[in-house]
Image (cartoon, grey):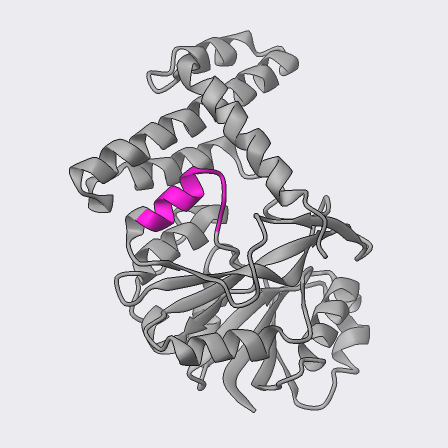
C-alpha cells in the first residue's frame, strides 16, 4: 500500500460521492487510508451510503456545514501518512492516478504538493472531450518554485487544480491556513507552500472534473477575484522585473473581469454600479484585445480531443 491518505470531501451529493469513492477504491495501487470527510450533510440524504460503506473506508463527519479550510484542517490533524489528498466528491480519479503521482512524488522528494490536469465531464459523468488546460505528455511535470510563478499561472486564467492535489503532510502543516480568500484559498495556499518546496503539476489528465450547476467553483464572485488579485499584487512576489510582468497580466485580467461585470450590472439595470466599475483606476481598455486573444487561444488548446 502507498503511504498516502485519500480524503474525499462530501456534502449532500451521495450519488457523486459513490462515484468518487469507487474511483479511489479501484486504483491500481491502493492508498493506506480512505476517509470521507463529510461537511454537515443532511443525515437522511446520506444514510443509504453511510450504512453500506466498503470495509476499511472511514467516515469523519461534522454536524453543521463549515466554510473555508476547516475540512483541510481536519485532514491534517487526522493524517498519519506521509502524503494526503482531499478529492472533491463530484470528481473521480483515473485508475492509475495514485500509482503515477506517487511515483513522481518519490522521484521528486523535494515537492510539497503535486496536482495534475483533468478532463471535463458533465453532471451525468459523460466525457466532454475537453481538458482543463492544454494537455502535455505522460510524466511531463511543471515545477513551480516561487510565489511569482504560481501567481502568474492564476493571473493568466489557469490554475493548479485543488481536487487532485497530493500534499506532503509535514510541509502543509507548516503553513498558516485562513479563510480570507474563500473559493480561491487554494491559490494562496500554493503560494505559501512553495516556501517549503516546489509545487508540481502533471500536464497529462489523470482525473475527471465534473462541470455542473451545483459546483462550488462554477462561479467565483467578482469581489473574491479582486481579493486574490490584490494578494498577487504585493511586492513579496518579486524582483522588479517580476512585479512589472505580473502587474501587466493582472491589469489585463482585471480589465476583462470589469467589462464582464459592467455588462452584468447593465443587464440588471444597475447603471450606477456599472458607471462606478467603468471609473475603476485599474480598468485598461487597451488590455482587452490582448486578453481576448489569449482567452481564445486557451479555449482552443483546452478543446483538443483527448486521444
Residue 61 seen from this side: no
Quadrant for the C terminus, please: bottom right
Q: Residue at x 67, y 61 (%)?
A: 91
In the depicted structure, whether residue 301 falls above or below residue 23: above
Q: Residue at x 79, y 64 (%)?
A: 15
Image location of residue 202, percent across then percent down: 51, 62
Q: Is residue 190 left or right of residue 34?
A: left
In the depicted structure, whether residue 82 falls above or below residue 39: below
The one nearer the camera, 41 or 6, is 6
Q: Is residue 226 magenta?
A: no
Image location of residue 110, percent across then percent down: 32, 73
Q: State how many labels appear.
A: 0
Image location of residue 57, percent across then percent down: 66, 84
Q: Is residue 206 left or right of residue 147?
A: right
Residue 77 quadrant: bottom left
Image location of residue 260, percent across then percent down: 55, 22
Residue 165 seen from this side: yes
In the depicted structure, whether residue 267 falls above or below residue 198: above
The one nearer the camera, 270 or 56, is 56
Q: Residue at x 33, y 16 (%)?
A: 281
Q: Is residue 109 left or right of residue 210?
A: left
Q: Main secondary structure of the magenta part?
A: helix
Q: Is residue 157 magenta?
A: yes
The one nearer the camera, 123 or 116, is 116
Quadrant for the N terminus, please: bottom right
Q: Which residues are magenta?
A: 149-159
In the orientation shown, which residue stands out farthest toward the left? 240
Amino acid at each position: 500500500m502507498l503511504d498516502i491518505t485519500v480524503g474525499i470531501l462530501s456534502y449532500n451529493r451521495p450519488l457523486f460521492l459513490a462515484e468518487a469513492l469507487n474511483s479511489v477504491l479501484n486504483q491500481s495501487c491502493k492508498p493506506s487510508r480512505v476517509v470521507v470527510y463529510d461537511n454537515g450533510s443532511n443525515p437522511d440524504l446520506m444514510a443509504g451510503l453511510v450504512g453500506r460503506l466498503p470495509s476499511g473506508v472511514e467516515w469523519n463527519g461534522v454536524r453543521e456545514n463549515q466554510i473555508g479550510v476547516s475540512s483541510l484542517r481536519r485532514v491534517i490533524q487526522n493524517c498519519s501518512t506521509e502524503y494526503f489528498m482531499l478529492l472533491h466528491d463530484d470528481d473521480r480519479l483515473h485508475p492509475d492516478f495514485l500509482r503515477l503521482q506517487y511515483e513522481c512524488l518519490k522521484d521528486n522528494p523535494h515537492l510539497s504538493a503535486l496536482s495534475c490536469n483533468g478532463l471535463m465531464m458533465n453532471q451525468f459523468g459523460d466525457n466532454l472531450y475537453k481538458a482543463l488546460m492544454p494537455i502535455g505528455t505522460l510524466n511531463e511535470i511543471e515545477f513551480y518554485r516561487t510565489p511569482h510563478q504560481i501567481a502568474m499561472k492564476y493571473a493568466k486564467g489557469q490554475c493548479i487544480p485543488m481536487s487532485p492535489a497530493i500534499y506532503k503532510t509535514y510541509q502543509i502543516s507548516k503553513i498558516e491556513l485562513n479563510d480570507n480568500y474563500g473559493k480561491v484559498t487554494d491559490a494562496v495556499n500554493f503560494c505559501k507552500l512553495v516556501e517549503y518546496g516546489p509545487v508540481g503539476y502533471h500536464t497529462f489528465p489523470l482525473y475527471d472534473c465534473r462541470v455542473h450547476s451545483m459546483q462550488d467553483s462554477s462561479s467565483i464572485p467578482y469581489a473574491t477575484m479582486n481579493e486574490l488579485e490584490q494578494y498577487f499584487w504585493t511586492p513579496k512576489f518579486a524582483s522588479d522585473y517580476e512585479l512589472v510582468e505580473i502587474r501587466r497580466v493582472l491589469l489585463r485580467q482585471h480589465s476583462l473581469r470589469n467589462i464582464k461585470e459592467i455588462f452584468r450590472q447593465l443587464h440588471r439595470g444597475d447603471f450606477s454600479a456599472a458607471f462606478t466599475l467603468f471609473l475603476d483606476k485599474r480598468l485598461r481598455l487597451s488590455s482587452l484585445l490582448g486578453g481576448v486573444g489569449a482567452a481564445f487561444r486557451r479555449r482552443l488548446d483546452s478543446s483538443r480531443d483527448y486521444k
